[in-house]
Image (tube, helix red, strand yellow):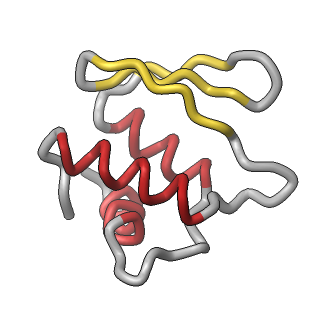
Amino acid sequence: MKRKHTKTLELLFAHPTSANVKWKDVEALLKELGAQVAEREGSRVVVKLFGQIRVCHRPHPSPSMDKGAVVDIRNWLAENGVKP
């Protein structure tokens, strides 16, 4: 895994939860883990990973994810054995 993806993973698992996690970095990390990412209506994004399908919301107008979305991604990764 590239250093950039490792930093993103560390930021996702940081406590307290960071409000400075960029969606494009998380999307790149998920793709590195083998995810298939597809655009949907509006700002929805479908992520297929770990044999599961998740619908995420691409943040706008700010590129940073809200803390709730960060916690959801963190929990999903942790449940599937991905940790920094």
Residue at left offset 34%, top offset 61%: 9
Q: Nearer the viewer, residue 4 or 71?
A: 71
Residue at left offset 58%, top offset 17%: 38
Residue 46 figure quarter: top right
Quarter of the figure that contains the C terminus = bottom left
Q: Is residue 26 left or right of residue 49?
A: right
Q: Where is residue 45 drawn, in percent x and y?
A: 62, 26
* Residue at the far right in the pictured view: 61
Residue at left offset 47%, top offset 25%: 47
* Residue at the far bottom in the pictured view: 16
Q: Is residue 47 left or right of residue 51?
A: right
Up-down relation of residue 29 to residue 31 (above or below): below
Q: Where is residue 80 drawn, in percent x and y?
A: 17, 39
Q: Where is residue 30 drawn, in percent x and y?
A: 40, 38
Q: Is residue 41 left or right of residue 47?
A: right
Up-down relation of residue 83 to residue 35 (above or below): below
Residue at left offset 25%, top offset 50%: 1
Up-down relation of residue 29 to residue 32 (above or below): below
Callout count: 0
* Residue at the far front in the pictured view: 68
Up-down relation of residue 78 to residue 48 (above or below): below
